[in-house]
Image (tube, helix red, strand yellow):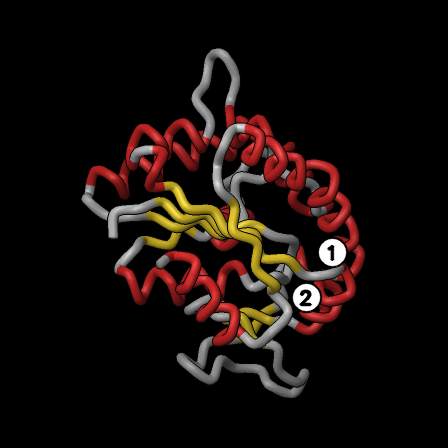
């Protein structure tokens, strides 16, 4: 399935979980932007200014993020695989670039063809974001998310240590929601204006139900 799939939605909408399920079923490569950048943060491999933005929950410098995207898109497409993004692009400039730089959408169209780009919007209310993210921990080894009790310290899948993501602190979640409303939602509006079809799905039900609805959208 050599297609480019984009999952968009507010924090806690289940984008990463659904991307993993889709990637497994259709043999796609899932590039998890959040996980990749979180790793760069923990390994201190990001510029000081970008690190400061990350710690506040602000959306990161689009130029810096865009270079990461373009590199990964080319690498995956050249290897003959389809790709799936969870949560990106996050800003209009990141999505469409400028006169000097091609944005994520241009790079995807060049690598896969515009007709092979499929976009889903997973929609949840702010209250659901706060509830899910404030209780979420991720495995430090396999990065699977878990919404389990505070007494659980190790991943049920691989026994890795469970950690709380930097951006899942309550104060940061509020800022991330604000950033989503002000800077990411305009991306969806611009995508529609440019003729891209966006399939909107309620992200509140169980993951299996959401996955079934995404499957129907893909068909």
* Image point (65%, 87%), residue name: 151
Is residue 50 visible from the viewing direction of this image? no
For disc 2, the marked residue is: 133
- Relative side of 118 to 120, left or right: left
* Image point (39%, 50%), residue name: 84
**Residue 209 in picture, x, y percent from top left:** 51, 74
Is residue 40 visible from the viewing direction of this image? yes
**Residue 57 in picture, x, y percent from top left:** 70, 47
- Relative side of 160 to 55, left or right: left
For disc 1, the marked residue is: 173
Identify the mark at residue 213; answer none if there is no mark: none
Q: In the rendered view, tell whether residue 151 sits above or below residue 219.
A: below
- Relative side of 71 to 47, left or right: left
Badge 1: residue crowd in 10 Å (few <14, some 14–19, many ≥20): many
Q: In the rendered view, tell whether residue 193 sits above or below residue 54.
A: above
Q: In the rendered view, tell whether residue 82 sits above or below residue 157.
A: above
Circle 1 — which element? helix
**Residue 39 in picture, x, y percent from top left:** 49, 52
Badge 2: residue crowd in 10 Å (few <14, some 14–19, many ≥20): many
Determine the CA span between mark 1 and mark 2: 7 Å
Q: Given contact means CB atoms under 8 Å apart, are the residues at marks 1 and 2 in contact?
A: yes
Q: Which residue is farthest top?
A: 99
Circle 2 — which element? helix
**Residue 103 in picture, x, y percent from top left:** 46, 27
């Amino acid at each position: 399935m050599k297609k480019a799939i984009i999952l968009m939605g507010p924090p806690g909408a289940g984008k990463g979980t659904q991307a993993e399920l889709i990637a497994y079923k259709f043999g796609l490569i899932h590039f998890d932007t959040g996980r990749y950048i979180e790793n760069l943060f923990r390994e201190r491999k990001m510029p000081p200014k970008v690190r400061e933005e990350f710690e506040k929950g602000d959306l990161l410098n689009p130029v810096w993020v865009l270079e990461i995207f373009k590199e990964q898109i080319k690498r995956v497409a050249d290897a003959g695989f389809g790709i799936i993004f969870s949560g990106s692009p996050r800003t209009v400039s990141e999505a469409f670039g400028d006169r000097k730089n091609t944005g994520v959408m241009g790079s995807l169209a060049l690598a896969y063809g515009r007709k092979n780009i499929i976009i889903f919007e997973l929609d949840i209310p702010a209250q659901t974001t706060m509830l899910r993210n404030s209780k979420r921990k991720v495995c430090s080894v396999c990065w699977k998310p878990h919404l389990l009790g505070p007494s659980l310290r190790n991943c049920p899948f691989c026994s890795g240590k469970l950690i709380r993501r930097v951006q899942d602190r309550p104060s940061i979640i509020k800022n991330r929601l604000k950033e989503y409303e002000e800077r990411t939602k305009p991306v969806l509006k611009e995508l529609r204006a440019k003729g891209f079809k966006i399939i909107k799905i309620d992200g509140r039900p169980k993951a299996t139900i959401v996955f079934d609805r995404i499957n129907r959208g893909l068909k």
